[in-house]
């Protein structure tokens, strides 16, 4: 299948852009090439393919067959490198560490939040430790299930 190679970076076309594409029944993938400017772009998590350009653009779904998405000879495929991606594990760790940090700052350094010393009641102390335990448990779960 003849392919028209274009660079999605800054929207500029590049007729000389060297792309080696692997067309499979499962989708389109960039194959590592020594001539590719960033060899990490071959990571499937960084790849974004569309059929056509501008308003007629259709995003190719990696899980669907190419024929089911209407890909035929002489279609223009546009490849975009999405750049570096962080893992879901990192997302969960950041998401769950935030409340631990914020609750600890408010509990142990109330002068920064309220402008004065605060004496915590028993209920407040129990609530604080329950929140810390809850998010610490989430951190452990994220480590175990996504590893």
Image (cartoon, rainbow, N blue to C red):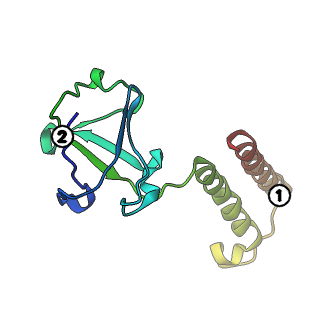
User: N-terminal of the two: label 2 or label 1?
Assistant: 2
Tag 1 residue: 125
Look at 47% across and 57% down and name the residue there.
Answer: 40
Instruction: Point out the image quarter for the N terminus.
Output: top left
What is the quadrant of residue 57 in the picture? top left
Split into 4 quadrants, where in the image is the C terminus?
top right
Indicate which disc residue 76 carries. Answer: 2
- Residue 34 placement: quadrant: bottom left
* Residue 79, image x, y percentages: 29, 48
Left or right for 114, reference 82 = right
Left or right placement of residue 96 versus residue 51 in this view: right
- Please state the total of marks drawn on the protein image: 2
Crowding at dot 2, Cα within 10 Å, few <14 / some 14-19 / many 20+, comes out as: some
Residue at point 18% right, 60% down?
12
Looking at the image, is 70 positioned above or below residue 134? above
Q: CA distance from mark 2 to mark 1?
A: 62 Å
Which one is in front, 117 or 66? Answer: 66
- Tell me: 116 left or right of 80: right
Task: Name the residue rendered at 82%, 57% in the picture.
Answer: 125
Residue 70 % position (x, y): 22, 24
């Amino acid at each position: 299948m003849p392919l028209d190679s274009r660079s999605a970076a800054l929207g500029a076309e590049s007729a000389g852009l060297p792309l080696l594409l692997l067309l499979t029944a499962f989708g389109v993938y960039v194959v590592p090439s020594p001539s590719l400017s960033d060899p990490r772009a071959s990571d499937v998590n960084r790849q974004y393919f569309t059929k056509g350009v501008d308003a007629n653009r259709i995003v190719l779904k990696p899980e669907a067959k190419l024929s089911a998405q209407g890909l035929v000879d002489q279609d223009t495929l546009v490849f975009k490198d999405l750049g570096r991606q962080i893992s879901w594990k990192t997302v969960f760790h950041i998401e769950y560490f935030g409340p631990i940090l914020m609750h600890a700052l408010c509990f142990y350094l109330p002068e920064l939040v309220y402008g004065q010393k605060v004496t915590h009641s028993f209920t407040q102390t129990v609530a604080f430790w329950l929140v810390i335990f809850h998010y610490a448990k989430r951190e452990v779960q994220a480590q175990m299930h996504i590893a």
